[in-house]
Amino acid sequence: MINFVGNPRLLDCCDPVTIQDVVDYCSDKTVLAVDTETTGLSHLDDKMIMCQIGDDRMQFVIDTRYVSILPLREVLESVSIVKILHNVKFDYKFLRMSNIRLNNVWDTMLTSQVINCGKQMSHSLNNVLQRDLNLTMDKSTRQEFVGKHDGEFTESQIVYGAKDVQHLVQLYEHQKVKCDKYDLHATAELENKAALAFADIEFNGIGLNIDTWKDLAKGAAKDVELISYALDAFIESNLKLNKFVDDYVQGDLFIGVEELRKVNVNWASPKQVLDVFKTYGLDVEDVNAKNLHVHSKDKFISTYIRYKEQSKLATSYGDKFLDNVDSDGRIRTNFKQILNTGRVASGKPNMQQIPADNSYRNCFVSGYDDWVFVSGDYSSQELCIIATGSKDPVWLKALENGEDLHSVCAQLVYGKEWSDAIEAGCEYYAFKTLGGGTEIAKQKCNCPGHKKLRTNVKSINFGLAYGMGPHKLADTLLISIKEAEKLIKKYFAAFPAIKNFLESLGNYGKHNGHIKTYAPYRRIRWFEDWDGINTDNTVMGKIERASKNTPIQGSGADMCKSALIMVRDFIYKNNLPVKIVMTVHDQIDTVVHASYADMWCTQLRELMEKSTLDIIPSGLLKSETEISNVWKK
């Protein structure tokens, strides 16, 4: 039954009621569906004009242009009433503009992504309803709300709004059964709670020092120009590349001939550059930087790689980036919450790919007077996850004692070669208080002999989390595939527990067609191309690699989302002067009033470390927090 709250009038499609009638009906319910209609996509510049709430028996459509929904605040913020929404982040941000913070939500879009993780499919409400309940919805009416600031709603618009909530309860019940079937309730609960934290980040935004950013953009553009001059000079000085130099240069009334380019190569054109490289004698199929790195000892190639890197900075993070600044002067991204591994991706602008160079990060500021950043990140998160899963004694001991794991591993892998590299001034062995007394602890050493060996093993250690094989290791270390295979073989001979751990993950995925993250979440990633023993060998190889890295990356993601939930809950429960403004991989960034920064620094660290205990109960994984005036890596 449809009820309408707004300008009183008689309509055949619904009954007129008051906002108090809505409150009376909703207050004693345990499950309610919620939706909004808005004039556009921006919670800053557009308006919520309709709010729908109810269940499969009774739906209330509220015209929020004329009726305040604040009387529903207690219902919407209740921790005991489940609110079902589809794409909760969108509705939440508009509700927050009405000073309402949702709690205890179930997002049918996110839950569909949890249940079907790894499968290529749409998770729009229409597609989910059609796939799960065999129901079809006509969404064409949605466009009629865009820009509708006044005027009465039509009957079709009211019916459309009501139907958006009518089927959500049934869909919720269906999804709960699916979660029971695949033991995914913990993951669904995690994602639904985390959605509110991601929505807070999107709502809050992050400040940007525009003048500093513009200076960086100018510098990057100038660097691109200078590097292109260097590439031109190489062409002109190499006889093999003579065909890329024009014999005659057309003059210009305003530019001297000596200022015009003689080289007829557009360095921004992959096709033209590939022609140059083949003429130069390079056997490559494309000019992707990852394929060129094996040739980077060549000065011409390394200069071009620098050109590509600097060009990306100049284009992606130049003046055009400022188009993303919102009307309040802040930058906001839109998170895609669930990738195949369970990790998070950042939409436009992609804040997770802001250059790690602090010159770019430091352009981002709190944007509030007397507020500072307090950021926290996990120390060696993926390494601790691998150590916990494999139970490798060397890894566990090194991490427990705060030793440099990469150096400890390098010593075991290289043996005599590592020992022979020890020289005067080597800092590998250092005295450190461990447990009951002073012992020798193995630390990071930058002496020339150890640094190279440590770097090689570090590439393997971190590569394990991404299913890295010999081809990737060869590209990373600029060595031959044969040398990479030999190094990996030596590595696994030194760490058989890790070898067995990764092989068991790979075999599980190949035999079952899916892989799971660590308990207690046990997130599932399905392999859509898997067909049992009939699976193509190439596909099976991809499944094996994904099965090795998904539990590591996915468990890290589970942990970070758990931390975001704890941080959000702690902030609101204690009414703290703190806002979550960003998260990148294993880092959580907040801004806080300066007077509370020291206290929050400790609390954030404790919350992040507490979030690890469900997955790593030993407490092995620690967090580091820092106070700063700008955003840092």
Image: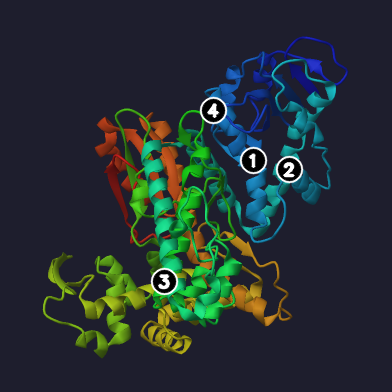
Residue bearing the label numbered 1: 87
Distance CA(mark 4)–CA(mark 3): 50 Å
Can residue 110 be seen here? The reply is yes
Say which label, 2 or 4, has the lower sequence index: 4
- Tell me if mark 3 has few (under 14), some (14-19) or many (20+) residues whose alpha carbon lies within 10 angstroms of its own: some
Name, please, the residue furthest toward the top: 8
The Cα–Cα distance between marks 2 and 4, rounded to whole angstroms, is 23 Å
For the point 79% across and 30% down, which residue is it?
Answer: 160
Q: Mark 4 against mark 3, which lies toward the viewer?
A: 3
Q: Amino acid at mark 2?
A: Leu
Question: Which residue was labeled with disc 3?
Answer: 302
Of the numbered discs in the image, which one, if any, rests on residue 96? Answer: 4
The vertical placement of 72 against 510, above or below, is above
Q: Which mark is residue 213?
A: none
Local SS, label 4:
helix
Disc 3 element: helix
